[in-house]
Image (cartoon, rainbow, N blue to C red):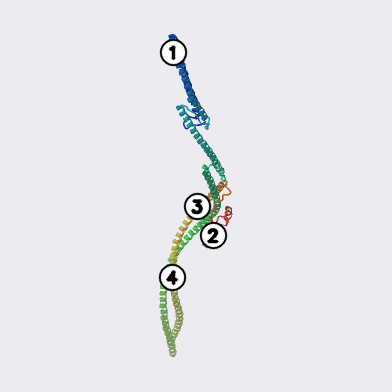
Amino acid sequence: MLELPGAATVTDVASIFPTSLRTRSAILFFAIATFAALQAVVGWSLAVDARAFGPWRGYGQILLLALAAAIITLSLIASICTWRRVVVPLAAVTEAVQHLARGETEHRLEIGACADVVAELAEACENLRLVIVDHVADERMIAESNAAQSRIVQLLGDGLSKIAQKDLTCRLTETVPYTYRGLQIDFNTAVEQLSQAIADVAESTQVLGAGMRETVAAADDLSRRAERHAANLEQTAASLADITGTVGRTAEDAEKARKIVAGASRDAEKSGVIVSHAIGAMGDIDRSSRKIGQIIGVIDSIATQTNLLALNAGVEAARAGDAGRGFAVVAAEIRDLARRCAKAAKEIEDLISASNAQIERGVTLVGETGAALSRIVEQIAKVNDVVAEIADRARLQAANLTEVNAAVGQMDQFTQQNAAMAEQTTAVNHRLGEETTELIELMSRFRIDARVGPASIRPERRRSVVVGGRVASVATPAPLPPAEKNAGDASDIDWIEF
């Protein structure tokens, strides 16, 4: 069924045309017949009246009959003309509209001479046919466009459905109208680029997985080393705290030793003074001994002289005889006393000589002792200086060790935190490894064209350098090996010692 640009359809127009034309034709023929009947009645009435009024009216009757016949003839002619100029063209218009209603737009409306109104109606019908022809052509083009659009939408839907099923090998290879050729090229290009991107992501994911495995292994090793380092540093901090306490106590002991040595130095100086006094006293004793020796010499001389006097007295008593016998006894006693005095003086002299020898020896020893004490005082002074310097250095070392102990305590705290962070990093790396594995599994679900290859990726290659006397590895750009080879060579990568 054809649809006009307005709200009505061709069928509606066709259904209106026959009814309207037939009604008008029937009304026209009814009017003509009525007019003819009226003429006949008028003529018959006149004839009756003529018979009634007499023969003299025969001429008028004939005239009326002729007039009626003329009128009837004219009516018939008018009816025929109306039939030919109105009814027949209207029938042709009706037939043309019915053809249009059936969609037969190839029938042209050709009518001969007809009334102006009918001609206008025929022209309007022809224009309607031309409009309908154009409309049909437009609808055909729209239908073809809709069919092509439906087909391209179906193809795009099938392609998107395959993409939704992770099949990236689909392409629009069917020939489509030129209007949709750009859409076909864009879709194929988009799928090609998406497939290329998925291939690149899959390859990068493989490399990332290998790198994550290496990172996880390195993080585990780093975590273990950090734990061992934290434990060792904790032990070192404890040992250093003990050493700090020991050095502090050593500094205190050194200070005490310095005070003791200072006291000993003062005592040694006092001893030196005492020794010098002793040396002076020994000199006095030596001088007194010499004076005693001189006195003993005088006593010995007196004893010798007394002995000589006693001897002379005995000689004189012997000369005197009995009268000098008592005096001889006294002289004998005096001589005996003189001998004893001489003997005692000799013994005292010997003792004084021995004492003088001992005193000289004691003076020598005291002098040597004084010299030794002087040297001891000097050495003690030096020792005091050394002990004072040791005490100062011990105090400084104790202060430095206290600072070092505090720094080591902070290092221990930082190392504990680093160990905790290393453990957290290890956990995060394990999680990233799991996520990378899941990503690799997701990437493996996509079907891509075998012609699509991954883009070239240049990862880092290790080169060896010397760090702190050790050979370590440093990253440098290198061509990308296959992911499997990267995963297999993960154990060959050297890590810098923590």
User: Is there a contact, CB below 8 Å, between mark 2 and mark 3?
Assistant: no
Dot 4 crowding, Cα within 10 Å, few <14, some 14–19, many 20+: some
Q: Position of residue 424 (x, y in %)?
A: 51, 51
| Residue neighbourhood size for the residue with mark 1, other residues' Cα within 10 Å, grouped as few (<14), some (14–19), many (≥20) | few
Disc nearest the viewer among 2 and 3: 2
Instruction: State which mark lies toward you, 1 or 4.
Output: 1
What distance separates the C-alpha of mark 1 from that of mark 4? 196 Å
Point out which mark residue 421 bears.
3
Residue 88 in view in this figure: yes
Q: Is residue 260 visible?
A: no
Q: Is residue 459 above or below residue 104?
A: below
Say which label, 1 or 2, has the lower sequence index: 1
Q: What residue is drawn where x is 46% and y is 28%?
A: 119
Who comes first in sequence, dot 1 or dot 3? 1
What residue would you read off at disc 4? 382
Could you tell which of marks 1 and 4 lies nearer the N-terminus?
1
Amino acid type at mark 1: Tyr
User: What is the secondary structure assignment of the residue under circle 1?
Assistant: helix
